[in-house]
Image (spheres, helix red, strand yellow):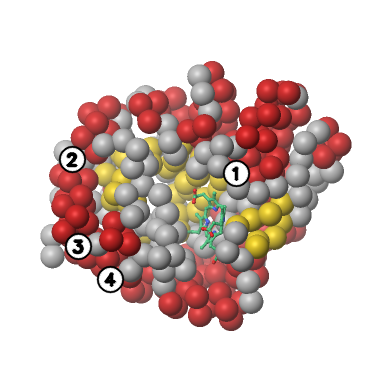
Amino acid sequence: MPQQKTILRALAGETLPTPPIWMMRQAGRYLPEYKATRAQAGDFLSLCYNPELAAEVTLQPIRRYGFDAAILFADILLLPQALGADLWFVTGEGPRLSTITDQAGLDKLGPVDEIDAVLSPVYETVKILSRELPADTTLIGFAGAPWTVATYMIAGQGTPDQGPAHALKNENRPVFEALLAKITAGTIHYLSRQIDAGAEVVKIFDSWAGSLEGKDFVRYAIEPAREITAALKAKYPHIPVIAFPRGAGHRYEGLHAAIGADCIALDDGVTPNWAAGHVQIDGCVQGNLASRHMVTGGKDLIRETRKVVQAFSNGPHIFNLGHGITPDADPANVQLMIDTVRGI
Ligand code: CP3
């Protein structure tokens, strides 16, 4: 059957006259309706584990803007929690977790086949969304990449340079690699259940891939993403995979083949012209307007949006930001970006 949904067509390698659009963190604090539903849920984690309300915030940006894809509302840190880590969010600061620094910490984690006890509300959210989304909107499931998830599990919080994770990698490689293997297995299980529940595409977020250098980038960013993709493709050959190794720079080149992904998501550290010539030649790309334009708007937004659309117009492209939209963004600038992409 020919594919109708625009995102799936782009992921299958089709060059479309207008690129389909969605936005990282499209359900988020820049939207008043998100803040209202989050207040109703009580806090961020309660929102993630409430299927009705999580589905509601997923749908809000679809109703407001008519994006071509919805991304499941959840967080990459729910998997560590399901594996047995303590997780909480400090308002205005971000996530906090219990830390893993040695074998004893690793041994405290539970088995991968028990994560559904915690994560089943997320699968329920996916089920609700596959019923309620408009027929032409694609549902994207996601997980964090093992390295990025590990950086939070090791440090117990976000870190500017992922120092604690690099330290464990350099000082106790067996424990570090065992942790990555555990997260990799958990991610395969978690994404499989999201697909079973109705996710049509999955995305692997490696937000901190850029801090891995040399062989470490290959071993701990590319290799786990390749392993997850291969395991999913074996079970679900028709489900496209988007890989987002943020901060890869010139190492974005060749990643379609190295990972086996259908699409490589680009941050704004590479220019659209460079990426068209070095990455998009291998397949679909997603990105890569700088998120700050959602704050600053105006002529710069229009010019840079057109630059991205133009540069990627000769191949398969999904329009997106280079990273998540920030809470200080103006919802009107999102509309201006969409109108500019669609030539309205
Ligand atoms: O709309 C979407 O994109 C889907 C939902 C989604 C969230 N987080 C919701 C969220 C997705 C795909 C994520 C991924 C995620 N979570 C990543 C990878 C992508 C990236 O941003 O680099 C990471 C590193 C996390 C971990 C995380 N979650 C951090 C570091 C924080 C705090 C920073 C912040 O922006 O506040 C979160 C919280 C979070 N996750 C929020 C949302 C909407 C804000 C929480 C709130 O409402 O208070």
Q: Where's the C terminus, which quadrant? A: bottom left
Asked whether residue 6 appears in the rendered view, the answer is: no
Q: Which residue is mark 1?
A: 159
Q: Name the amino acid, label 1.
A: Thr
Q: Position of residue 207 (x, y in %)?
A: 50, 42
Between disc 4 and disc 3, whose residue precedes? 3
Residue carrying label 2: 311
Circle nearer the N terminus (1, 3): 1
Closer to the N terminus: mark 4 or mark 2? Answer: 2
Task: Give the Cα separation between the discs numbered 4 and 3.
Answer: 10 Å
Query: How many residues crowd mark 2 within 10 Å: few (<14), some (14–19), many (20+)?
Result: some
Question: Marks 1 and 2, Cα distance to the nearest angstrom?
Answer: 34 Å
Q: Position of residue 88 (x, y in %)?
A: 70, 60
Q: Does the residue at mark 1 contact the one at mark 2 (Cβ under 8 Å)?
A: no
Q: Secondary structure at mark 2?
A: helix
Q: Amino acid at mark 4?
A: Ala
Q: CA distance from mark 4 to mark 1?
A: 32 Å
The first of marks 1 and 2 along the sequence is 1
Q: Nearer the viewer, residue 135 or 146?
A: 146
How far apart are labels 1 and 3 at the CA level? 33 Å
Work out how far the residue at label 2 is from the one at label 3, CA to CA, in angstroms. 20 Å
- Dot 1: what SS? loop
The residues bearing labels 4 and 2 have C-alpha atoms spaced at a distance of 25 Å
Q: Which residue is mark 4?
A: 332
Which mark is on residue 298? 3
Residue at x 17%, y 46% (from the top left corner): 307
* Mark closer to the observer (1, 2): 1
